[in-house]
Image (cartoon, grey):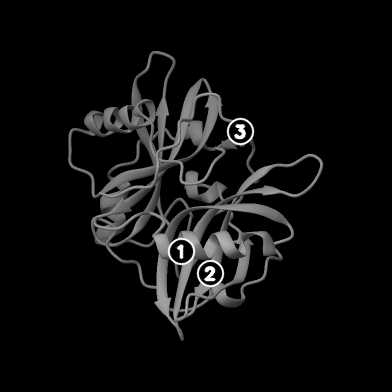
Amino acid sequence: MKRTQPVLFAGMLALSLLLGGCGGNASSEPPASEETAEEEALVEEDGSEVREAGWIALSGANPSLAAEESDAFDQAVQALDRNVPFSPVALLATQQVSGTNYAFLCEGMDASWHIVVCYQNPDGETRITSSQELKVNELRIATGAPMGALLGSWQVKDQADVQLVPQELADAFAKVKDSYASATLDPIAALASRDDDGHDYLVLCEGEAREEEASRSLFVAVVHVGDAGEAQLQDVAQLEFLSCVSASA
């Protein structure tokens, strides 16, 4: 799979992540379906480690997996002793508890996105404690944030042969990112796209508030790329995060 330049996490600046929810129904008893049942089978009964605040968003655009994080995910999968329907592509945040929680952005085998939490205890043993699908047409954003262009029929495409941030999007984002006054934004992944007199991208971003005591958060943004290459930032909203990492949120 083609990826952008890996970012090493050791020594990276990480500040408090503003918390909230993900996409779709994040209750502890989601509607029954084959897909839901498959995901529930991956989640340990004791998920208490992911129910507290204190998540730390990682700094830097395109936080590709370092060896340590990739090994933690692989160990959690091996503990299940079964195949899983998705693979990790980026580490979004960590949480220090009695051990460490890792929140991974994963891509599904069925053109879908998921946020999977792995808990690593002080002895280094790791297990999956939470799995939530990030539904691009049902994103839950921070209260009071504008919806606008975030709404619409977004299409998730198979990421196997493309970059998390395609070059066209990277070039466009570089042109428009400074037009958002509330925070600096760095793209993590193009979650979905649609054709609209050019090309629209729904982008998961890491952002840092433009204020004295800056904090890092996850955002979703819509970037429009015209047929002639012109770019426009059409909408930005902070993603609610807590229900992405806790089914009881």
Depth check, mark 2 against mark 1: the one in front is 1
Picture coordinates of residue 141 (x, y %)?
A: 60, 61
| Residue denoted by label 1 | 169
Picture coordinates of residue 126 (x, y %)?
A: 35, 25
Q: Is residue 24 visible?
A: no
Picture coordinates of residue 215 (x, y %)?
A: 70, 42
Circle 3 crowding by C-alpha within 10 Å: few under 14, some 14–19, many from 20: some
Q: Earlier in the sequence, mark 2 or mark 1?
A: 1
Name the residue at the top extreme: 123
Circle 1 crowding by C-alpha within 10 Å: few under 14, some 14–19, many from 20: many
Q: What numbered label is drawn on residue 14?
A: 3
Q: Which residue is rendered at x = 26% and y = 34% of the image?
A: 77
Circle 2 crowding by C-alpha within 10 Å: few under 14, some 14–19, many from 20: many
| Residue denoted by label 2 | 223
Amino acid type of the residue that numbered disc 3 sits on in the rendered structure: Ala
Query: Whole-Å distance between the Cαs marked 1 and 3?
Result: 25 Å
Name the residue at the left extreme: 82
Q: Residues at badges 2 and 1 in contact (C-beta under 8 Å)?
A: yes
